[in-house]
Image (cartoon, rainbow, N blue to C red):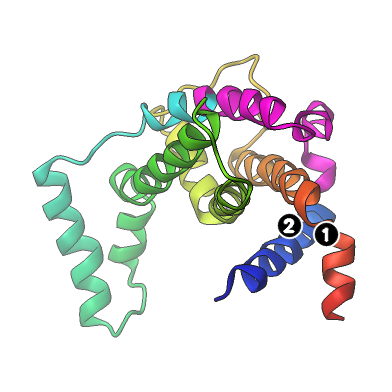
Amino acid sequence: MKPQQFLTFVAIAVASYTQLDAQQVPTEVISLEWATTRDSRRAQATEWLAEISALANQIPTLSPAETAWLQVEYDDQLTSNAGTFTPRALRARLSKEGSARFAKPVADEIVGLLGQLASASPLPRQREVALWSGLAYLTLGSTFWQDVSRLGELGVIARDSESKWIFPGFDAHGLGLQSLWAARSQYILGHYCPVKSRIESIG
């Protein structure tokens, strides 16, 4: 996919998510002020880096025994059933081990992108756009936030009672996290390519 097509795809996805779930997004994150200059965007990336790093550090790295268990209960079950979820595979996928296995690499990748965006090193505009777009793409994934929510329900990830990430119930928490980042992503991309004009241009 070409960069132009990728930006359009992400912009449309952001618009769709925001339209569906905007009512669940805390109002304090809906602002364009942070996107106006490189310094303000760097400051915002630094804040989000601390936020996501704290989350990523709580997601455990699987032990060899846990990895082997998932291989049998999840991977082998899918392989032997032509990719169809069996009850065993589903239980494994929804377990602490399954959620950690899929959430950890995504969280680490988000941390890597934010680390580059928060760096004081010179950052060419084209590269910065690519980094923000990559961040938007990763954080719009519902499966990642469902895994994060599940790990919170299981007590693996701590839930700060004063955090803006607190939403009542498992489903609402996962949707709330996804919606929060959908809103953030909208304003990330809106600074570079306004969603409305991007959609109209391909209509």
Residue occupying the point 28% across, 45% down:
97
Q: Is residue 12 magenta?
A: no
Numbered label attached to residue 195 = 1
Mark toward the start of the polypeptide (1 vs 2):
2
In the image, farthest residue toward the bottom? 82
Q: In the rendered structure, are the residues bearing label 1 and label 2 in contact, judged by CB atoms less than 8 Å apart? A: yes
Query: Residue 99 vs residue 129: left or right?
Result: left
Disc 2 target residue = 14
**Residue 33 in view here:** yes
Residue occupying the point 90% across, 73% down:
200
Please tell me which residue lies in front, 134 or 80. Answer: 134
In magenta, the rendered stretch is: 22-50
The kind of residue tagged 1 is Val
The kind of residue tagged 2 is Val
Q: Position of residue 166 (x, y in %)?
A: 65, 27
Residue occupying the point 35% across, 47% down:
105
**Residue 31 in view here:** no
Query: Residue 142 vs residue 12: left or right?
Result: left
- What quarter of the picture does the C terminus occupy? bottom right
Query: Residue 43 vs residue 152: left or right?
Result: right
Distance Cα–Cα, label 1 vs label 2: 8 Å
Quarter assignment of residue 56: top left
